[in-house]
Amino acid sequence: MEEYHLMTLWIMASYLVDDFKTVPTFYLSHKRERKEQAMRTLSQLAYRAFLAASVTPSALFRAIEMWKVTLLIDEAEYQIKNDSESAALYQT
């Protein structure tokens, strides 16, 4: 139940991102079916949601700069293992 409260607050915070000095990160690590459902829900409710399964650092920065998106990255752990440039990005 606490997960739903946290997700709701995170969605609300995505609409006020310009008012924050830092932005919270939200990680989902449920069963595959629940994670996919949560990602679809977040993509519909978060402010300017941009759902990506794989994204390069340059495309990531370009999307943020151009459209001020809320990033929803699925399977980021696989990118970190397979791409050293992406690994450096996700570790910060």
Image (cartoon, grey):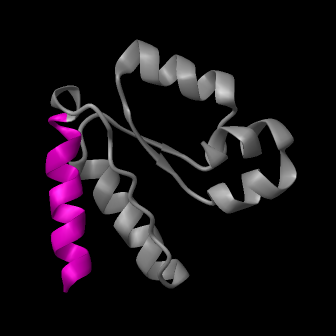
At which x and y percent is residue 33? 48, 80
In the image, the segment drawn in magenta is 1-16
Vertically, is 18 above or below 16?
above
Q: Is residue 22 above or below residue 18?
A: below
The residue closer to the viewer here, 50 or 1, is 1
69 sits to left or right of 12: right
Q: Quadrant of residue 92?
A: top right
Residue 19's x, y, as percent?
15, 29
Residue 70 within the magenta-colored segment of the rendering: no
Quadrant housing the N terminus: bottom left
Toward the viewer: 76 or 38? Answer: 76
How many numbered marks appear? 0
Position in image of residue 40 (x %, y %): 37, 59
Q: Say above or below: 81 vs 32.
A: above
Q: Which residue is located at x 65 percent, y 48 percent?
A: 91
Q: Which residue shows up at 38% across the image and 59% down it? A: 26
Image coordinates for residue 69, horizontal then vertical, percent: 37, 30
Name the outermost residue toward the top.
66
Residue under the point 80% across and 35% down: 85
Up/down of 70 relative to 67, above or below: below
Q: Magenta stretch mostly in which secondary structure?
A: helix
**Residue sitting nearer the eye, 68 or 89:** 89
**Is 2 part of what is drawn in magenta?**
yes
